[in-house]
Amino acid sequence: MPKLTVALPEVLVRIRNSCESFFKENFNTNSLKLAIFFSLPVYINFFLLEYEVSVNFPLKILFFLIMCAAFYSIFYLKHKWFGSGFFIGLFWFWWIGLSFRYYGLSFLVPFVSLGIAVFYGILFWLIGKAYNLFDKVNFGEVFLILFFAFGFDYVSPFTFDWLKPEILLANTFVSPTKPVLVLLLASAAFVKKYRLISVVLLFAAFIFSPKEYVKMPEMDFYVASTDIPQDKKWDESYIPYEIKQNFHIINKAINLKKDVVVLPESAFPLFLNMYDDLMDRLKKLSNKITIVTGALHLKNGKYYNATYVFENGDVKILDKHILVPFGEYIPLPFFQKEINELFFGGASDYATSEKFGIFKIKNELFINAICYEATVEGLYKLKPNYVVALSNDAWFMPSIMPSLQQMLIKVYSKKYKKTVYHSINGFRSYIIGYEE
Protein backbone atom coordinates (compact mmCIF):
# COMPACT_ATOMS: atom_id res chain seq x y z
CA MET A 1 0.00 0.00 0.00
CA PRO A 2 1.22 3.48 -0.73
CA LYS A 3 2.55 5.35 2.33
CA LEU A 4 0.22 8.12 3.44
CA THR A 5 1.75 11.46 4.29
CA VAL A 6 0.11 14.42 5.91
CA ALA A 7 1.47 17.80 4.94
CA LEU A 8 1.83 20.12 7.88
CA PRO A 9 0.59 23.67 7.41
CA GLU A 10 3.42 26.03 6.61
CA VAL A 11 2.98 27.92 9.90
CA LEU A 12 3.41 24.73 11.95
CA VAL A 13 6.46 23.75 9.92
CA ARG A 14 8.04 27.13 10.67
CA ILE A 15 7.24 26.78 14.37
CA ARG A 16 8.74 23.29 14.45
CA ASN A 17 11.88 24.42 12.64
CA SER A 18 12.23 27.43 14.94
CA CYS A 19 11.96 25.20 18.02
CA GLU A 20 14.53 22.76 16.67
CA SER A 21 16.86 25.62 15.84
CA PHE A 22 16.41 27.15 19.32
CA PHE A 23 17.17 23.92 21.15
CA LYS A 24 20.21 23.14 18.99
CA GLU A 25 21.57 26.64 19.56
CA ASN A 26 20.93 26.84 23.32
CA PHE A 27 21.12 23.31 24.75
CA ASN A 28 23.63 20.47 24.68
CA THR A 29 24.76 17.66 26.97
CA ASN A 30 27.68 19.74 28.24
CA SER A 31 25.21 22.29 29.61
CA LEU A 32 23.55 19.48 31.52
CA LYS A 33 26.93 18.24 32.81
CA LEU A 34 27.90 21.70 34.07
CA ALA A 35 24.54 22.07 35.85
CA ILE A 36 24.93 18.64 37.45
CA PHE A 37 28.37 19.56 38.83
CA PHE A 38 26.94 22.80 40.21
CA SER A 39 23.96 21.03 41.77
CA LEU A 40 25.44 17.80 43.15
CA PRO A 41 26.76 19.41 46.36
CA VAL A 42 23.27 20.66 47.26
CA TYR A 43 21.67 17.25 46.71
CA ILE A 44 24.42 15.31 48.51
CA ASN A 45 24.17 17.75 51.42
CA PHE A 46 20.40 17.14 51.57
CA PHE A 47 20.90 13.42 52.17
CA LEU A 48 23.61 14.10 54.74
CA LEU A 49 21.22 16.35 56.66
CA GLU A 50 18.32 13.92 56.26
CA TYR A 51 20.29 11.02 57.73
CA GLU A 52 22.32 13.10 60.22
CA VAL A 53 25.68 12.32 58.61
CA SER A 54 28.42 14.79 59.50
CA VAL A 55 30.71 16.17 56.82
CA ASN A 56 33.85 14.17 57.60
CA PHE A 57 37.25 14.25 55.90
CA PRO A 58 36.41 11.92 52.95
CA LEU A 59 33.20 13.85 52.27
CA LYS A 60 35.11 17.14 52.30
CA ILE A 61 37.40 15.67 49.64
CA LEU A 62 34.34 14.68 47.58
CA PHE A 63 32.78 18.14 47.88
CA PHE A 64 36.10 19.77 46.97
CA LEU A 65 36.52 17.61 43.84
CA ILE A 66 32.96 18.35 42.69
CA MET A 67 33.58 22.06 43.22
CA CYS A 68 36.76 21.85 41.11
CA ALA A 69 34.83 20.02 38.37
CA ALA A 70 32.12 22.69 38.40
CA PHE A 71 34.61 25.57 38.12
CA TYR A 72 36.62 23.73 35.45
CA SER A 73 33.43 23.18 33.44
CA ILE A 74 32.74 26.92 33.30
CA PHE A 75 35.90 27.53 31.32
CA TYR A 76 36.54 24.32 29.37
CA LEU A 77 33.30 22.46 28.70
CA LYS A 78 31.84 23.55 25.38
CA HIS A 79 28.48 24.22 26.95
CA LYS A 80 25.64 26.43 25.79
CA TRP A 81 25.24 29.36 28.16
CA PHE A 82 21.45 29.54 28.05
CA GLY A 83 21.13 25.81 28.64
CA SER A 84 23.59 25.89 31.53
CA GLY A 85 21.70 28.66 33.28
CA PHE A 86 18.36 27.02 32.56
CA PHE A 87 19.37 23.69 34.12
CA ILE A 88 21.12 25.32 37.11
CA GLY A 89 18.05 27.46 37.80
CA LEU A 90 15.81 24.42 37.50
CA PHE A 91 17.94 22.09 39.64
CA TRP A 92 18.50 24.68 42.37
CA PHE A 93 15.10 26.41 42.52
CA TRP A 94 12.40 24.10 41.15
CA TRP A 95 10.86 24.02 44.66
CA ILE A 96 9.99 27.73 44.92
CA GLY A 97 6.53 27.31 43.42
CA LEU A 98 5.59 24.57 45.91
CA SER A 99 4.22 27.17 48.34
CA PHE A 100 1.41 27.92 45.87
CA ARG A 101 -0.12 24.54 46.78
CA TYR A 102 -1.42 26.05 49.99
CA TYR A 103 -3.20 28.91 48.24
CA GLY A 104 -5.19 26.56 45.99
CA LEU A 105 -2.88 27.38 43.07
CA SER A 106 -1.12 24.06 42.47
CA PHE A 107 -1.47 24.49 38.71
CA LEU A 108 1.05 27.36 38.89
CA VAL A 109 3.86 25.23 40.33
CA PRO A 110 5.34 24.01 37.01
CA PHE A 111 4.99 27.46 35.45
CA VAL A 112 6.88 29.07 38.34
CA SER A 113 9.66 26.48 38.04
CA LEU A 114 9.86 26.99 34.28
CA GLY A 115 9.85 30.77 34.65
CA ILE A 116 12.75 30.67 37.12
CA ALA A 117 14.72 28.35 34.84
CA VAL A 118 14.17 30.66 31.87
CA PHE A 119 15.23 33.69 33.95
CA TYR A 120 18.58 32.08 34.81
CA GLY A 121 18.89 30.82 31.24
CA ILE A 122 18.65 34.40 29.97
CA LEU A 123 21.09 35.58 32.66
CA PHE A 124 23.69 33.00 31.65
CA TRP A 125 23.07 33.78 27.96
CA LEU A 126 23.98 37.41 28.72
CA ILE A 127 27.08 36.23 30.61
CA GLY A 128 28.05 34.22 27.52
CA LYS A 129 27.58 37.23 25.24
CA ALA A 130 29.74 39.40 27.52
CA TYR A 131 32.37 36.64 27.68
CA ASN A 132 32.57 36.53 23.87
CA LEU A 133 33.14 40.28 23.75
CA PHE A 134 35.90 40.22 26.38
CA ASP A 135 37.45 37.11 24.83
CA LYS A 136 38.18 39.07 21.65
CA VAL A 137 40.65 41.16 23.63
CA ASN A 138 41.95 38.16 25.65
CA PHE A 139 40.06 39.08 28.82
CA GLY A 140 37.37 36.40 28.60
CA GLU A 141 38.66 34.29 31.48
CA VAL A 142 39.22 37.36 33.66
CA PHE A 143 35.62 38.46 33.08
CA LEU A 144 34.26 35.04 34.04
CA ILE A 145 36.43 34.90 37.18
CA LEU A 146 35.23 38.31 38.32
CA PHE A 147 31.58 37.72 37.44
CA PHE A 148 31.31 34.34 39.14
CA ALA A 149 33.09 35.75 42.18
CA PHE A 150 31.15 39.04 42.49
CA GLY A 151 28.45 39.32 39.82
CA PHE A 152 25.79 37.14 41.45
CA ASP A 153 25.79 39.44 44.49
CA TYR A 154 23.96 41.93 42.27
CA VAL A 155 21.52 39.45 40.75
CA SER A 156 18.66 39.37 43.25
CA PRO A 157 15.22 39.19 41.60
CA PHE A 158 12.74 40.43 44.22
CA THR A 159 15.63 40.40 46.78
CA PHE A 160 16.15 36.63 46.23
CA ASP A 161 19.90 36.00 45.92
CA TRP A 162 20.45 32.33 46.72
CA LEU A 163 22.46 31.54 43.57
CA LYS A 164 25.95 32.10 44.94
CA PRO A 165 29.00 30.07 43.81
CA GLU A 166 30.34 30.28 47.39
CA ILE A 167 27.77 27.63 48.31
CA LEU A 168 29.97 25.08 46.53
CA LEU A 169 32.70 25.84 49.07
CA ALA A 170 30.48 25.37 52.14
CA ASN A 171 31.46 21.75 52.84
CA THR A 172 35.06 21.85 51.64
CA PHE A 173 38.42 22.54 53.31
CA VAL A 174 38.54 26.16 52.16
CA SER A 175 36.88 29.33 53.44
CA PRO A 176 33.86 30.58 51.43
CA THR A 177 35.26 34.11 51.14
CA LYS A 178 35.67 36.26 48.05
CA PRO A 179 39.48 36.12 47.88
CA VAL A 180 39.44 32.31 48.14
CA LEU A 181 36.67 32.08 45.52
CA VAL A 182 38.70 34.26 43.13
CA LEU A 183 41.79 32.08 43.66
CA LEU A 184 39.86 28.86 42.98
CA LEU A 185 38.18 30.23 39.86
CA ALA A 186 41.50 31.55 38.57
CA SER A 187 43.15 28.20 39.27
CA ALA A 188 40.45 26.47 37.20
CA ALA A 189 40.71 29.05 34.42
CA PHE A 190 44.49 28.73 34.01
CA VAL A 191 44.92 24.98 34.57
CA LYS A 192 45.48 24.24 30.87
CA LYS A 193 47.50 27.30 29.85
CA TYR A 194 49.59 27.91 32.98
CA ARG A 195 49.62 24.75 35.09
CA LEU A 196 52.26 25.90 37.54
CA ILE A 197 50.39 29.15 38.20
CA SER A 198 47.19 27.15 38.59
CA VAL A 199 48.77 24.94 41.27
CA VAL A 200 50.17 27.98 43.09
CA LEU A 201 46.74 29.62 43.11
CA LEU A 202 45.18 26.42 44.44
CA PHE A 203 47.66 26.27 47.32
CA ALA A 204 47.10 29.97 47.97
CA ALA A 205 43.40 29.24 48.44
CA PHE A 206 44.31 26.89 51.29
CA ILE A 207 46.73 29.41 52.80
CA PHE A 208 43.97 32.04 52.86
CA SER A 209 41.64 29.59 54.64
CA PRO A 210 43.03 29.52 58.20
CA LYS A 211 41.12 27.67 60.90
CA GLU A 212 39.83 30.10 63.49
CA TYR A 213 37.69 29.61 66.54
CA VAL A 214 34.91 31.54 68.23
CA LYS A 215 34.04 31.40 71.91
CA MET A 216 30.75 29.59 72.37
CA PRO A 217 28.21 31.00 74.83
CA GLU A 218 28.32 29.35 78.23
CA MET A 219 24.83 27.89 77.99
CA ASP A 220 23.29 24.67 76.74
CA PHE A 221 20.75 24.99 73.90
CA TYR A 222 17.89 22.64 73.02
CA VAL A 223 17.11 23.43 69.37
CA ALA A 224 13.75 21.81 68.65
CA SER A 225 12.54 20.25 65.41
CA THR A 226 8.82 19.92 64.67
CA ASP A 227 7.01 18.24 61.81
CA ILE A 228 3.66 20.02 61.43
CA PRO A 229 2.37 19.66 57.82
CA GLN A 230 1.71 23.02 56.20
CA ASP A 231 -1.87 22.11 55.33
CA LYS A 232 -2.56 21.65 59.07
CA LYS A 233 -0.34 24.44 60.40
CA TRP A 234 -3.10 27.07 60.51
CA ASP A 235 -6.07 24.70 60.93
CA GLU A 236 -8.00 25.92 63.98
CA SER A 237 -8.87 22.36 64.98
CA TYR A 238 -5.17 21.41 64.89
CA ILE A 239 -3.78 24.41 66.81
CA PRO A 240 -4.51 22.92 70.30
CA TYR A 241 -2.31 19.94 69.38
CA GLU A 242 0.50 22.26 68.27
CA ILE A 243 0.30 24.21 71.53
CA LYS A 244 0.35 20.99 73.55
CA GLN A 245 3.39 19.78 71.59
CA ASN A 246 5.21 23.07 72.21
CA PHE A 247 4.79 22.78 75.96
CA HIS A 248 5.89 19.15 75.78
CA ILE A 249 9.11 20.26 74.05
CA ILE A 250 9.70 23.00 76.64
CA ASN A 251 9.19 20.63 79.56
CA LYS A 252 11.45 18.04 77.92
CA ALA A 253 14.21 20.67 77.63
CA ILE A 254 13.70 21.57 81.31
CA ASN A 255 14.01 17.90 82.32
CA LEU A 256 17.22 17.69 80.28
CA LYS A 257 18.51 20.65 82.33
CA LYS A 258 19.00 22.83 79.23
CA ASP A 259 19.50 26.57 79.59
CA VAL A 260 17.66 27.64 76.43
CA VAL A 261 14.96 26.01 74.27
CA VAL A 262 14.37 27.28 70.73
CA LEU A 263 11.13 26.51 68.84
CA PRO A 264 10.52 27.13 65.11
CA GLU A 265 8.89 30.00 63.25
CA SER A 266 5.17 30.31 64.07
CA ALA A 267 5.40 27.42 66.54
CA PHE A 268 2.38 29.11 68.12
CA PRO A 269 0.22 29.76 65.01
CA LEU A 270 -1.72 32.66 66.51
CA PHE A 271 -1.31 36.21 67.78
CA LEU A 272 0.40 35.06 70.95
CA ASN A 273 0.37 38.46 72.67
CA MET A 274 -3.46 38.38 72.56
CA TYR A 275 -3.64 35.17 74.65
CA ASP A 276 -2.92 36.11 78.25
CA ASP A 277 -3.21 32.54 79.53
CA LEU A 278 -0.52 31.26 77.14
CA MET A 279 1.71 34.25 77.83
CA ASP A 280 1.43 33.66 81.58
CA ARG A 281 2.27 29.96 81.24
CA LEU A 282 5.33 30.73 79.14
CA LYS A 283 6.48 33.48 81.50
CA LYS A 284 6.18 31.10 84.44
CA LEU A 285 8.20 28.40 82.67
CA SER A 286 10.83 30.97 81.70
CA ASN A 287 11.92 31.05 85.34
CA LYS A 288 13.25 27.52 84.73
CA ILE A 289 14.49 27.89 81.13
CA THR A 290 14.83 30.66 78.55
CA ILE A 291 12.22 30.13 75.82
CA VAL A 292 12.65 31.42 72.25
CA THR A 293 9.65 30.75 70.00
CA GLY A 294 8.01 31.97 66.84
CA ALA A 295 4.44 33.33 66.77
CA LEU A 296 2.38 36.12 65.28
CA HIS A 297 2.30 39.57 66.85
CA LEU A 298 -0.58 42.04 66.67
CA LYS A 299 0.39 45.65 67.33
CA ASN A 300 -1.52 48.82 66.47
CA GLY A 301 -3.76 46.88 64.08
CA LYS A 302 -0.77 45.53 62.13
CA TYR A 303 0.35 41.92 61.69
CA TYR A 304 3.93 40.88 62.39
CA ASN A 305 5.83 37.62 62.08
CA ALA A 306 7.73 37.64 65.35
CA THR A 307 10.10 35.96 67.77
CA TYR A 308 9.14 35.87 71.45
CA VAL A 309 11.92 35.60 74.04
CA PHE A 310 10.77 34.61 77.52
CA GLU A 311 13.34 34.85 80.29
CA ASN A 312 12.98 35.12 84.09
CA GLY A 313 9.27 35.89 83.86
CA ASP A 314 9.66 38.66 81.26
CA VAL A 315 9.12 38.69 77.51
CA LYS A 316 10.72 40.53 74.59
CA ILE A 317 9.06 40.53 71.16
CA LEU A 318 11.20 40.97 68.03
CA ASP A 319 9.37 41.55 64.76
CA LYS A 320 10.64 40.36 61.41
CA HIS A 321 12.63 42.91 59.43
CA ILE A 322 12.85 41.38 55.92
CA LEU A 323 9.83 39.59 54.47
CA VAL A 324 9.59 36.72 51.98
CA PRO A 325 8.70 38.08 48.51
CA PHE A 326 5.29 36.82 47.33
CA GLY A 327 4.96 34.85 50.58
CA GLU A 328 4.62 37.69 53.10
CA TYR A 329 4.35 40.68 50.78
CA ILE A 330 3.93 41.55 47.09
CA PRO A 331 7.25 43.06 45.89
CA LEU A 332 5.72 45.05 43.05
CA PRO A 333 5.07 48.80 42.84
CA PHE A 334 1.70 48.22 41.17
CA PHE A 335 -1.38 45.96 41.36
CA GLN A 336 -0.49 44.81 44.88
CA LYS A 337 -4.12 44.82 46.03
CA GLU A 338 -5.32 43.06 42.88
CA ILE A 339 -2.65 40.34 43.12
CA ASN A 340 -3.48 39.78 46.78
CA GLU A 341 -7.17 39.42 45.92
CA LEU A 342 -6.59 37.17 42.92
CA PHE A 343 -3.96 34.81 44.33
CA PHE A 344 -3.95 35.16 48.12
CA GLY A 345 -7.60 35.76 48.98
CA GLY A 346 -7.04 39.37 49.98
CA ALA A 347 -4.57 38.49 52.73
CA SER A 348 -2.82 41.56 54.06
CA ASP A 349 0.95 41.95 53.81
CA TYR A 350 2.85 41.64 57.07
CA ALA A 351 4.35 44.75 58.62
CA THR A 352 8.07 44.90 59.40
CA SER A 353 10.41 46.26 62.03
CA GLU A 354 12.84 49.02 61.10
CA LYS A 355 15.92 46.87 61.65
CA PHE A 356 17.10 43.39 62.61
CA GLY A 357 16.31 42.48 66.20
CA ILE A 358 19.05 41.94 68.77
CA PHE A 359 18.33 40.49 72.20
CA LYS A 360 20.10 39.15 75.26
CA ILE A 361 20.10 35.72 76.86
CA LYS A 362 22.03 35.60 80.13
CA ASN A 363 23.91 38.78 79.13
CA GLU A 364 25.05 37.36 75.76
CA LEU A 365 23.87 39.17 72.63
CA PHE A 366 22.01 37.29 69.89
CA ILE A 367 20.69 38.32 66.46
CA ASN A 368 17.09 37.39 65.65
CA ALA A 369 16.52 35.75 62.23
CA ILE A 370 13.14 34.50 61.06
CA CYS A 371 13.25 32.11 58.08
CA TYR A 372 14.31 34.13 55.01
CA GLU A 373 16.32 36.54 57.18
CA ALA A 374 18.73 33.73 58.10
CA THR A 375 20.00 33.80 54.49
CA VAL A 376 20.43 37.59 54.28
CA GLU A 377 24.12 38.49 54.32
CA GLY A 378 23.57 41.89 55.90
CA LEU A 379 22.33 40.23 59.09
CA TYR A 380 25.69 38.51 59.60
CA LYS A 381 27.54 41.81 59.41
CA LEU A 382 26.03 42.84 62.75
CA LYS A 383 28.28 42.71 65.82
CA PRO A 384 26.84 39.83 67.95
CA ASN A 385 28.57 36.49 67.41
CA TYR A 386 25.41 34.39 67.77
CA VAL A 387 22.30 34.04 65.62
CA VAL A 388 19.02 32.38 66.61
CA ALA A 389 17.10 31.44 63.46
CA LEU A 390 13.51 30.16 63.29
CA SER A 391 12.10 28.63 60.08
CA ASN A 392 9.05 26.88 58.72
CA ASP A 393 10.33 24.84 55.78
CA ALA A 394 7.10 22.84 55.51
CA TRP A 395 5.99 25.28 52.80
CA PHE A 396 8.50 23.71 50.41
CA MET A 397 8.63 20.07 51.46
CA PRO A 398 9.51 17.64 50.07
CA SER A 399 12.40 19.39 48.32
CA ILE A 400 16.09 20.27 48.59
CA MET A 401 15.23 23.74 49.90
CA PRO A 402 16.48 23.05 53.49
CA SER A 403 19.82 21.87 52.08
CA LEU A 404 20.34 25.01 50.02
CA GLN A 405 19.26 27.13 52.99
CA GLN A 406 21.67 25.33 55.33
CA MET A 407 24.62 25.65 52.95
CA LEU A 408 24.04 29.37 52.49
CA ILE A 409 23.78 29.85 56.26
CA LYS A 410 27.01 27.85 56.62
CA VAL A 411 28.75 30.16 54.12
CA TYR A 412 27.79 33.26 56.12
CA SER A 413 28.54 31.53 59.42
CA LYS A 414 32.10 30.78 58.31
CA LYS A 415 32.61 34.10 56.55
CA TYR A 416 31.50 36.25 59.48
CA LYS A 417 32.48 33.94 62.35
CA LYS A 418 28.96 33.38 63.67
CA THR A 419 27.33 30.47 65.44
CA VAL A 420 23.75 29.80 64.29
CA TYR A 421 21.08 27.97 66.27
CA HIS A 422 18.43 27.04 63.69
CA SER A 423 15.07 25.60 64.76
CA ILE A 424 12.95 24.29 61.87
CA ASN A 425 9.44 22.99 61.28
CA GLY A 426 9.36 20.42 58.48
CA PHE A 427 13.00 19.41 58.60
CA ARG A 428 15.81 18.56 61.01
CA SER A 429 17.11 21.46 63.11
CA TYR A 430 20.82 22.08 63.62
CA ILE A 431 23.54 24.21 65.14
CA ILE A 432 26.15 25.68 62.81
CA GLY A 433 29.49 26.96 64.04
CA TYR A 434 31.76 28.39 61.37
CA GLU A 435 34.39 25.95 62.63
CA GLU A 436 32.94 22.46 62.90
Image: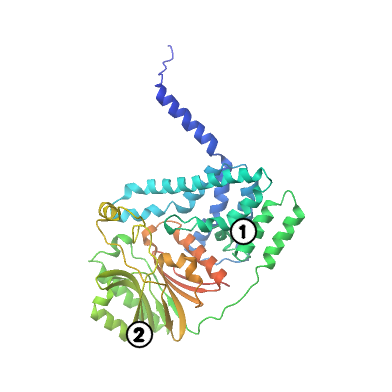
Q: Is the C terminus in the top left, top right, bottom left or bottom right quadrant?
A: bottom right
Give the image location of residue 58, x and y in percent. Answer: 63, 63
> Toward the viewer: 152 or 335?
335
Asked whether, in this view, residue 337 is left or right of residue 39, the answer is: left
Give the image location of residue 210, x and y in percent. Answer: 65, 71
Residue shown at 65% from the left, 68% from the top: 209
**Disc 2: which residue:** 286
Indicate the colouring scheme: rainbow
Cα distance, mark 2 to mark 1?
Answer: 45 Å
Few, some or many residues within 10 Å of mark 1 (<14, 14–19, 20+): some
Q: Is the N terminus in the top left, top right, bottom left or bottom right quadrant?
A: top left
Q: Amino acid at mark 1?
A: Leu
Q: Describe the element under mark 2 as helix, strand or loop.
A: loop
The extreme right residue here reads: 196
The answer to whether one can see residue 303 in this image is yes
Tag nearer the camera, 2 or 1: 2
Give the image location of residue 374, x and y in percent. Answer: 45, 67
Give the image location of residue 299, x and y in percent. Answer: 27, 74
Q: Describe the element under mark 1 as helix, strand or loop.
A: helix
Residue shown at 65% from the left, 52% from the top: 142
Asked whether, in this view, residue 177 is left or right of residue 250, the answer is: right
> Toward the viewer: 235 or 103?
103
**Dot 2 or dot 1, earlier in sequence:** 1
**Disc 1: which residue:** 62
Judge whether 199 appears above or below 19 on screen. Answer: below
Residue 291, located in which quarter of the rendered image? bottom left
The answer to whether one can see residue 258 in this image is no
Q: Amino acid at mark 2?
A: Ser
Instruction: Give yes or no for contact between labels 2 and 1 (Cβ–Cβ under 8 Å).
Output: no
Residue shown at 65% from the left, 58% from the top: 184
